[in-house]
Amino acid sequence: MPATGAACARATALIAAGRYPEAREAAKAALEAEGPEPTLFLALARAHMAEDEDDHDDEAERVFRRALDAFPDDLDLLAGYAELCLRSDPLDRPGRHRRGPVLLERLRELAPDSPQLRRADASTDVLAATAGRGPSAARVQRHDVVHALTSAASPEAAGEEVRRQVARAPHDRRLAVLDASLDALGRPGRAPLRRLVLRRPEYLLVVQLVVAALVIARFAVEGFPVWIPFAVAVIADLPLLALGLLLRGARARGGERMSGAVDGERAPGEADGERTPVAEGGERTPVAEGGEPAAAEPYLPEVPRRSRRELVLVGAGAAVLLGAGVTTGTLAYAEYTAYPRYEAVAPDSFRGMARMDVGGVPEGAGFGSSSGRVETSFNAVYTGGSGDGSGLSVTVSIGDFHDATVALVEESGALLASTPGVTPLGDGWMADAGAYGGWMRCDRYTEDLAGTSKAACFWTDRGSMGVVTFRASEDMTDAEVEQLARMTRQTELRPVP
């Protein structure tokens, strides 16, 4: 029945094009015009199944039951209904799911070695990808491109072979997408992208190794720029991005071309008196005039989930990333918790002044009480001088202050303002902390009782914190205040290797 075959081919092609409502309308119109026909019932049911929605699955089951009432032993109908039942949710549709094994047994009785039984038994078909259970469209495309390029002597030969197949099966989406992909990859200057699509897993592994090595080098090489691994990763991703955009555009053009072939009366390359209805499983069987089928030709191989090569490379890449992550995390934690070690020097004299022992840290100094772990503290007062820089007092805490931040010294101004018996003179300023690093802030103030003008400089780094105070008249510049504070700090403390 030629009209029925053409209607079935059009409905199946519309399903492949993702135009499910049109496919249902085409199948219904053909059923009304030609009467009950198994292939039309199957196309209508699959057009509902392709929607992957409960209501459409219910409607597909009604179509299968109606069709099997008229054609109880049709293998394609039994296989399609079995697939629907086996793929249904056993909790949501328990009755439908239980009918799957019964239909499989019926298929085994009628045709134990049939392809319909094998497809139903595996519960897969050409709609599996649409239902989200099969490989993605991008993976199918890459697989087909790799297969075509590795199977042919040259990219040109691969393109010619695919164009020949497209002429025989103009409604095949995979072939249309593959043709558009090879056309895009075969243009001048795109040989690197062809090599990339063939060696994509190896390329990813090499990039992962390089980036992982650069990330670890940040901790091994002093002064190594942090941005280099990120820059390398971005640059290495550009070819993959270009390839992805090219293949995405080819998928869109292939879908449009195939959709146009569905709408046309005759696809390009289709000879007079020849049609290419779609057989079960995605293969096309050319049909000569009079309805006699020609030899079937499988055009594209099944897309595997993962090859052993891919699994090995993906596993190696995952191991590299995991190892780099663990190593980087360990080194970063060690770097974060590291702090400089100091020992207290506190010489007997400093700038001509003698040290006066006053014991431990004065009550209320509280250095490190909430900022880390204090290992030792001391307080030294130097007397005997006169003028600026005399009457120097230094209080120091040594320990683990790896969480120290600039906020600690910024808050020292508020601490000074709240100290009884002193009056701050204007706003303080952030000073150069000097060779030991960290942060330093200096403030000027007046002792209310004696009326003496003084300066106080607070500092902190990850291994020490302290404050030094001394006389500082208006004639003593801010730079001189900072210099004396740095000198005191570097005299009272000595770094321990």
Image (cartoon, rainbow, N blue to C red):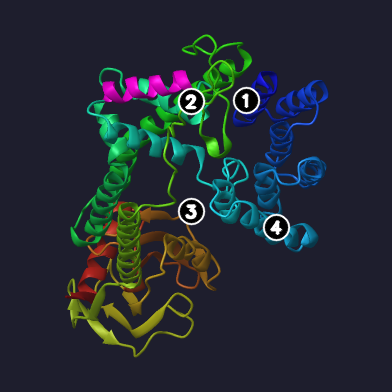
Q: Which mark is residue 294?
A: 2
Whether residue 136 is situated above or below residue 306 in the rendered picture: above
- In what element is the residue under mark 4? helix
Q: Which residue is mark 4?
A: 100
Quadrant the C terminus occupies: bottom left
Q: Residue 273: image x %, image y %?
A: 55, 11
As measured in the structure, the alpha-carbon distance from the residue carrying label 2 to the one carrying label 4 is: 33 Å
Confirm or deny contact between disc 1 and disc 3 (CB under 8 A). no
Residue pushed farthest top? 272
Q: Amino acid at mark 1?
A: Ala
Q: Which mark is residue 9?
A: 1
Nearer mark to the viewer, of 1 and 2: 2
Please give the range of residues in magenta: 155-168
As measured in the structure, the alpha-carbon distance from the residue carrying label 3 to the one carrying label 2 is: 99 Å
Quadrant the N terminus occupies: top right
Left or right: 259 in relation to 386? right
As measured in the structure, the alpha-carbon distance from the residue carrying label 1 to the one carrying label 3 is: 89 Å
Q: Residue 423: image x %, image y %?
A: 51, 64
Q: Is residue 384 visible?
A: no
Nearer mark to the viewer, of 2 and 4: 2
Q: Which mark is residue 426?
A: 3
Confirm or deny contact between disc 1 and disc 4 (CB under 8 A). no
- In what element is the residue under mark 3? loop
- In what element is the residue under mark 1? helix
Total marks shown come to 4
**Residue 452 inside the magenta-drawn segment:** no
As measured in the structure, the alpha-carbon distance from the residue carrying label 1 to the one carrying label 2 is: 16 Å
Q: Amino acid at mark 4?
A: Gly
Q: Earlier in the sequence, mark 1 or mark 4?
A: 1
Residue at 27%, 23% in the rendered image: 157
Q: Residue 180: image x %, image y %?
A: 42, 22
